[in-house]
Image (tube, coloured by chain):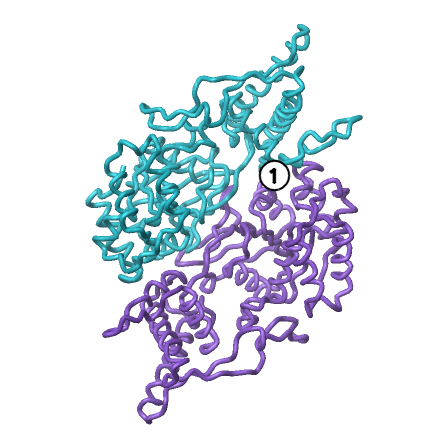
Chain colours: A cyan, B purple
Amino acid sequence: MAETKKDSGAKSELVKMGKKIVEDIKHGKSPKIELSVRGLSNVVYDKESKTLGLGEKTAERLFFNVGHAKKFLQTIEIASICKTLLDVAKHASLRDVFYMAKRTIPSTNINVVDEQKESDKAIEDLELITSYSRENLNVNANKMGSVAGKVVVEDSGDTIDWSKLGSGGWSIPSNVENIKFKKVNAKYVIYMEKAAVWERLHEDRFWEKQNCIIMSSQGQTTRGIRRLLQRLCTEHKLPIYVLADNDPWGWYIYSVLKFGSISLAHMAEEMAIPSVKFIGITCDDVINYDLKRHFIKLNDQDISRLKQMQNYDWFTKNKAWQRQFKMMKDFGAKVEIQSLSSKGISFISEKYLPDKVRKQDWLD
Amino acid sequence: MAETKKDSGAKSELVKMGKKIVEDIKHGKSPKIELSVRGLSNVVYDKESKTLGLGEKTAERLFFNVGHAKKFLQTIEIASICKTLLDVAKHASLRDVFYMAKRTIPSTNINVVDEQKESDKAIEDLELITSYSRENLNVNANKMGSVAGKVVVEDSGDTIDWSKLGSGGWSIPSNVENIKFKKVNAKYVIYMEKAAVWERLHEDRFWEKQNCIIMSSQGQTTRGIRRLLQRLCTEHKLPIYVLADNDPWGWYIYSVLKFGSISLAHMAEEMAIPSVKFIGITCDDVINYDLKRHFIKLNDQDISRLKQMQNYDWFTKNKAWQRQFKMMKDFGAKVEIQSLSSKGISFISEKYLPDKVRKQDWLD
């Protein structure tokens, strides 16, 4: 794969960091790395951008400090691995990077890294130091999810038409930074957490009838999916609608997509999508579509997650969401998206979603 | 989607079953359904076909039997739902079918089904009664996984070239029964459990250099993947190689693919692939490729799974596998496939796999 602008940008940041350390050494100074403090104490909700981000606290990592030396070494080692990946234009997973870094420091019995969380942390540090995401450092996240719609992309030398991929759709790569959009003919994107719902909409050719893009994961929203949604939103001005279960976990998926999460606060700009809307299932849907008979009782984890969300900075003054939280608490129950199938196999694609979109009936 | 031969076959089996019950009623007999007994007591390992299957025990399910009546009703209800799905040529997930069946029996307060496992069991019963898999009854499993290679398929009216889908690959549908293979240019298939390994091989264009097909899931081997592998093996005579961690779970994935599993014993013919080979990671690989320094200690679950496999009928007389089991037990440790990355980012695609394939160094 040819080197892109972002590749060379990330690489030059790594080189800059290395050169600075060499300078420190040449001048007889203790080599140091400066970076923002991660962690709850420095995570702030920015009311203007409406995303979670890092505050202004910074920390120094010194080579000549017993408490810092190993982390310092790990950061440099991982930086070197990323530089190599960029040089040879290859990508590695987090696990690969761990194994690439895992070696014994010569004439000691100490390993550079013993556990993956050490190399993971070092990669997060490099994201902060270079201002490039780990995808730009050629380190990939998990691969998951499918997409369909009237979109043509160019990727790794191939031209791929998302509308002509049979019942399977395009398998979303873990890294979507180098994808080029050649044609985007869609009015909006629906992202759903469940692959089975995606298959329902796809079989009904929902994307063709509604002129939209349908995208799903299976479980977690991977970074590849988040970035793909974000690129469609920012580069092509498409509204993104989240379709999830009527339960605290489905709502949490929405919250993370829209506002970001504590663990990704340092990457909010690349990852959060403040304009995302929640299209359903809402507690009003439960009433309007007569889904109460499919109630599943909230368990303790559900209730505690619900309370947590009620108290999130970004939800406390949001009346519409506070109303939803209260309704679910009063119901004492949640409802799955597939319960709509009780009204007919294609109810979701022929009635529920078209109505919601037409009435602009979503939560912000 | 047009009706296929299998669709009409499955449908006529459902109709036959319904007609038989109507006949029973007309003749004043207690309506009954006959089917093979599922469960461990009737699961046998067939040494000839080398797969797990059901024995000859059958059972009757009677409508006029307090213990049978509800199950009888559930079977008929789910049969009717499958018939409808086939009539309208649409597919549903197991969860959808549950919600479609979940309704209160008129003038009672009893639900046809209360939990998904009831409708799931009814679908398994229908697989036995009709001799068609639930995919043929238009009930889909989970969707997961990606594939790449020099293969062209026709699916849902689209022609899809697995070699021209960028870094993502084709997203494998949950149901692959209706896929038509138009061109298959490959010498073998490598199936791996980890999507990150698939991305490594794909970025290195392993399938092109080695003239093979690469397929992955993320975690479980879904029924869609199993059937796709089986079709490539039986219809195109391609050897299938499993690439998994050197641990009891990776080996179990191989065991299930090759011999089938207890829960799928009634579907062995459609699901098991007796010719599958295990290409690695073996305990010999651990030694030959100097991977001992990446040992991860076996935990209690690992050890008990290992013992279980040692005693499986289909492994007890297999000297090569018994040797592996013993080696891992002696190591007291397992090794992950990504540990090969410690030898270089593309070591797996440039050295490890080509060597293994050339030397035909696999376990049967």
What residue is disc 1 on?
Answer: A95
Residue lying farthest to the left in this orientation = A359
Disc 1: host chain? A
On the picture, is B237 further left or further right than A133? Answer: right
**Mark 1 crowd level (few <14, some 14–19, many ≥20, 10 Å Cα):** many
In the shown orientation, is residue A226 left or right of residue B269? left
Where residue B145 appears, as percent x and y from the top left, is: 51, 51
Secondary structure state at the residue bearing disc 1: helix
Q: The disc labelled 1 sits on which kind of residue? A: Arg
Where's residue A229, x and y in %? 39, 38
Residue furthest to the top in view is A27
Work out whether residue B217 can be spotted. yes
User: In this image, B283 relative to B260: left or right?
Assistant: right
Rendered image quadrant of residue B84: bottom left
Q: Residue at x 39, y 45 (%)?
A: A249
Residue A310 location in percent, x, y?
32, 37
Q: Quadrant of the C terminus of chain A?
A: top left
Q: x, y percentage for residue B164? A: 50, 46
* Up-down relation of residue A223 to residue B240 (above or below): above
Residue beneath the point at 28% across and 73% down: B105
User: Is residue B182 visible in the rendered structure shown here?
Assistant: no
Q: Quadrant of the N terminus of chain A?
A: top right
- The residue positioned 51% from the left and 23% from the top of the image is A128
Residue A11 lies in quadrant = top right
